[in-house]
């Protein structure tokens, strides 16, 4: 398989991966430089939107249209891969916390990120980990992705049946979740999922629709200037909200509350609008970035092409960065080392992921 | 704000007297939840009563009561042998047994290991979604263990207590726990004292877990912690629930804001 040439999708996916790595080390000095500081959405929206975009390729197949059976197998297999990745990185994260607690003799580390019940109630919690109803803090986006990917079997089938139905159905589910405040429950601990799949499916579906070469997707590809014009107001509103620190008191907002509040769990409309607006600006910015910063584009595309591996290693690198800050203290020097090593680790992961393809290319 | 010795004595006497008076009036109106012999501590050790109008209305006029327990591992119930032994679940049982026609909904929103600032980030949204009439915020232990600066901790808790009170939500702070390791930890006690002062300043009921647990562990020799000397065992959660239930009901009979002047 040949390596894809740099493109906007891989670039922005790589950008999202680096941002997620940085944002998952709370307190890191460089956290202030990520794009969530200039708006009201963050890399999670970008990551899930691009996951939906990629689904289009998986569900569509290479050339000839896939049979129903092949579509189910292909999308389902991707879901299984994501599930396996979630289980592996969760176990590694638990081991990382435990090992650090042993080395530095600090028991409170076993409490971090919802991990305490893993150590104190292992029987129930291990069942919960496997069922994805127990998620460690910062290790909660892949469970969403797993649900979305298994749900994507249905999405792909509806799309084959009647492509025009996909977006209205997705929108209806989103509105239902906002009005009813329904979310997936956690177990064994009482609570709800940090990323509500019933809401986040909309941005995933929007990515799927936008990647299409007909309908809305075709219009988006044909009209980049109009897309930018549509995106600029939301982008500017996000800038203003971030600049003035606007954070409305949720108890003074009208009902249904989730239509008006800015919330990540339910990907509320304001966040969604801002995220889509930001994507429009990003799409317009890519040609300029490619022109002036080709090396950066090449590096981020390397990450973006190998997003699952890079995401998994990046999640663990973020946790290692948190632990390093805890042990060494948070200052600019430590933060710089964490950032630099993290980016190198992400790059090496991407490079190793493509090593087989590179070797094959060299020998042919 | 530091209390002088005379002020402390005066306040302790006042608290003891109030506790007796409140207990008597509560008994006359239907009875405070009993405290089992294993969990008995001197009453002023548990809490200083502060008004809880929503709880009072629910108990007196049988209005629905929605309680949201938020905090860290002690709210989750880490160390308990079963989820039913967590303090929010045991508290529900106690209140429902004591007030058979109480329309109580208990929501547990504990996340282990969480610092006050992280809890505060989700507290506003959780309150807005759940619309509780009473919030039990268990707070401070992780901030103390993770060396969060005292001023930062106080600012975070104060802001969110004021926000809830401004929306007429009853607020109860459930303070830091006792652990043998914490006895000589200056920062731990700095956070603990800061929380006590904050509760007095803001007129918020603070359940003083540290004093109650220390009494049980040291004076009575009743083990309320697991082997890790950090998390509560089943009896610890039982006592925690009993103490909170007692403090809640006693406070619910306090009609008027009671603000004894802090003496320097």
Image (tube, rainbow, N blue to C red):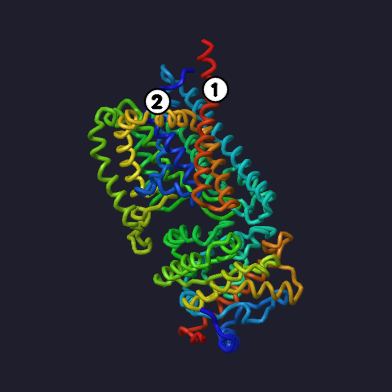
Judge if badges 1 and 2 mark residues of a common chain. Answer: yes
Q: Visible in this render: residue A114?
A: no
Image position, residue B145 (x, y; %): 61, 61
Image position, residue A307 (x, y; %): 48, 32
Under tag 1, what secondary structure?
A: helix
Name above or below for residue A263 compared with residue B212: above
How far apart are the alpha carbons under marks 1 and 2?
Answer: 17 Å
- Asked whether, in this view, residue B116 is left or right of residue A243, the answer is right
Residue B136 versus residue A302: which sits nearer the camera? Answer: A302
Badge 1: residue crowd in 10 Å (few <14, some 14–19, many ≥20): few
Identity of the residue drawn at 44% across and 34% down? A14
In the picture of the structure, the residue carrying the numbered disc 2 is: A6
Q: Quadrant of residue B115?
A: bottom right
The chain that hosts pointer 2 is A
Residue B67 versus residue A173: which sits nearer the camera? Answer: B67
Q: Quadrant of residue A205?
A: top left
Name, please, the residue furthest toward the front.
A333
Name above or below for residue A136 compared with residue B180: above
Name, please, the residue furthest toward the top.
A364
Badge 2: residue crowd in 10 Å (few <14, some 14–19, many ≥20): some
The chain that hosts pointer 1 is A
Q: How many marks?
A: 2
Image position, residue B129 (x, y; %): 43, 59
In the picture of the structure, the residue carrying the numbered disc 1 is: A355
- Asked whether, in this view, residue B151 is left or right of residue A253, the answer is right
Name above or below for residue A198 compared with residue B61: above
Specify which label sits upstream in the sequence, 1 or 2. Answer: 2
């Amino acid at each position: 398989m040949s390596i894809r040439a740099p493109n906007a999708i891989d670039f922005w996916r790589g950008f999202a991966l680096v941002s997620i790595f940085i944002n998952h080390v709370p307190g890191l000095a460089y956290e202030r430089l990520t794009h969530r500081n200039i708006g009201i959405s963050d890399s999670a929206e970008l990551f899930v939107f691009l996951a939906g975009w990629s689904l289009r390729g998986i569900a569509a197949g290479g050339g000839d249209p896939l049979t129903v059976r092949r579509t189910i197998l292909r999308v389902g297999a991707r879901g299984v891969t994501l599930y396996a990745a979630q289980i592996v990185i969760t176990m590694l994260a638990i081991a990382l916390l435990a090992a650090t607690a042993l080395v530095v003799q600090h028991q409170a580390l076993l409490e971090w990120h919802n991990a305490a019940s893993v150590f104190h109630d292992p029987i129930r919690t291990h069942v919960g980990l496997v069922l994805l109803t127990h998620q460690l803090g910062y290790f909660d986006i892949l469970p969403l992705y797993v649900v979305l990917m298994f749900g994507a079997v249905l999405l792909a089938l509806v799309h084959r049946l009647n492509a025009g139905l996909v977006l209205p159905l997705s929108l209806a589910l989103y509105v239902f979740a906002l009005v009813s405040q329904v979310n997936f429950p956690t177990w064994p601990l009482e609570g709800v999922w940090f990323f509500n799949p019933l809401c986040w499916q909309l941005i995933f579906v929007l990515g799927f629709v936008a990647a299409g070469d007909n309908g809305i997707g075709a219009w988006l590809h044909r009209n980049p200037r109009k897309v930018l014009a549509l995106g600029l107001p939301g982008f500017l509103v996000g800038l203003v909200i971030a600049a003035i620190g606007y954070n409305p008191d949720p108890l003074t907002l009208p009902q249904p509350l989730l239509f008006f509040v800015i919330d990540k769990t339910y990907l509320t409309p304001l966040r969604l609008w801002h995220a889509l607006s930001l994507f429009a600006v990003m799409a317009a910015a890519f040609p300029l970035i490619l022109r002036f910063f080709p090396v950066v584009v090449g590096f981020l595309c390397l990450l973006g092409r190998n997003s699952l591996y890079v995401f998994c290693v990046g999640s663990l690198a973020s946790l290692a960065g948190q632990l390093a800050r805890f042990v060494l203290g948070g200052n600019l020097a430590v933060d710089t080392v964490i950032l630099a090593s993290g980016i190198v680790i992400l790059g090496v992961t991407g490079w190793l992921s493509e090593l087989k393809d590179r070797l094959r290319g060299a020998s042919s | 704000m530091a209390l002088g010795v005379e002020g402390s004595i005066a306040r302790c006497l006042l608290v003891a007297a109030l506790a007796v008076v409140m207990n008597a009036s509560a008994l006359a109106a239907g009875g405070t939840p009993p405290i089992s012999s294993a969990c008995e501590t001197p009453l002023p050790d548990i809490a200083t009563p502060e008004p809880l109008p929503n709880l009072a209305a629910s108990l007196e006029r049988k209005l629905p009561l929605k309680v949201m327990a938020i905090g860290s591992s002690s709210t989750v119930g880490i160390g308990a042998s079963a989820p039913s032994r967590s303090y929010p679940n045991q508290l529900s049982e106690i209140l429902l047994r004591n007030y058979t026609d109480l329309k109580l909904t208990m929501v547990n929103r504990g996340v282990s290991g969480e610092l006050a600032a992280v809890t505060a980030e989700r507290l506003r949204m959780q309150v807005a979604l759940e619309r509780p009439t009473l919030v039990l915020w268990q707070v401070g232990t992780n901030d103390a263990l993770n060396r969060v600066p005292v001023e930062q901790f106080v600012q975070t808790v104060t802001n969110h207590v004021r926000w809830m009170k401004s929306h007429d939500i009853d607020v109860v702070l459930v303070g830091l726990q006792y652990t043998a390791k914490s006895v000589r930890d200056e920062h731990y006690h700095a956070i603990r004292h800061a929380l006590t002062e904050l509760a007095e300043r803001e007129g918020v009921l603070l359940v003083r877990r540290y004093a109650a647990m220390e009494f049980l562990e040291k004076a009575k020799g009743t083990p309320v912690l697991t082997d890790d000397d950090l998390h509560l065992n089943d009896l610890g959660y039982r006592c925690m629930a009993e103490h909170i239930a007692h403090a809640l009901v006693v406070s619910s009979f306090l009609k008027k804001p009671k603000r004894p002047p802090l003496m320097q």
